[in-house]
Amino acid sequence: MKDSATGRSVRARPNNQARRWGMPTSTPELATDMTTVGLIGSGNIGGTVARLAVAAGHDVVLSNSRGPETLKDLVAELGPRARAATPAEAAAAGDLVVVTIPLRAYREVPAAPLVGKTVIDTNNYYPERDGHFPELDDESTTTSELLQAHLPESSVVKAFNNIYFAHLHALARPAGAADRSALPIAGDDAGAKAAVTAFLDSLGYDAVDVGPLAEGWRFQRDTAAYAGLYSADPADWGRPVARNAEQVRAAVAAARRYADS
């Protein structure tokens, strides 16, 4: 089969790591060289993306604010495709880099090693955790636009922010599966969005292109396309449920600004 964004051949392969983690045992693999994924932040979302990436055949370089030594257990779990590093080292090593840290720390993301790279931003704004950002409170910008302004020579794509980490792990499916889910993405660079679309495909997800970063609010916290979308009972984010591209597009279209809610 071919990847819809790149036209490159893709093949499914069995994966023992996937079997161990309870994931589908056949995941899509790009037939070209695998990507090295740098992770700035290795918490719930970062760790889940790392697990899916390793299961898909990618290498991962993990980092956090507490130092590489604090990631030894996760590295041991992930196996030889994973190593721990500093945030700057993870940024430099990654062909694709995932920033998954609290919004309040976005200015600490190292800019120089990310020049020319595609950066996936998983952020959401929680004032009780992050403090207040007036430009987010008045909805004159979005979280990913803040990161893009901090990284002017990188191409930021918003993704992974609208799904509970346990659901992200549980819902991954091979391309063509009837119960494959889609995730929304937003970004200003078409090439970067194509790269992220291909990466999502390798992890087990379709992508729904919502438009530029400015439209990323449509799947931010407390919108119709936020985490409850992938739960059979949105009231308590219980059992995960697959949501295809059509369902995600409908949820994105139903989004309302906080001021209009």
Image (cartoon, grey):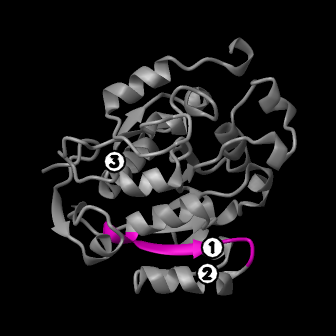
Q: Secondary structure at mark 2?
A: helix
Q: Circle 1 sits on which residue?
A: 63
Q: Earlier in the sequence, mark 3 or mark 2?
A: 2
**Separation of marks 3 and 2 at Cα, in angstroms:** 27 Å
What's the residue type where badge 2 is placed? Answer: Leu
Is mark 1 in CB contact (under 8 Å) with mark 2?
yes
Asked if residue 56 is among those painted magenta in the image, a careful observer would answer yes
The answer to which quarter of the image holds residue 203 is bottom left
Q: Circle 2 sits on which residue?
A: 71
User: Residue 188 placed where, x, y %?
Assistant: 53, 35
The answer to which quarter of the image holds residue 44 is bottom right
Q: Earlier in the sequence, mark 1 or mark 3?
A: 1
Mark 3 closeness class: few <14, some 14–19, many ≥20 residues within 10 Å: many
Rendered view: 238 above or below 172: above
Report the quarter where the C terminus lies: top right
Q: Secondary structure at mark 1?
A: strand
Q: Circle 3 sits on which residue?
A: 205
Q: Which residues are the magenta region?
A: 54-66
User: Residue 69 placed where, x, y %?
Assistant: 66, 87
The residue at 31%/34% (across/down) is: 244
Indicate left or right for 177 with 235 as reference: left
The residue at 68%/63% (across/down) is: 112
Q: Nearer the viewer, residue 231 or 192?
A: 231
Indicate left or right for 135 with 169 as reference: right
Rendered view: 76 above or below 213: below
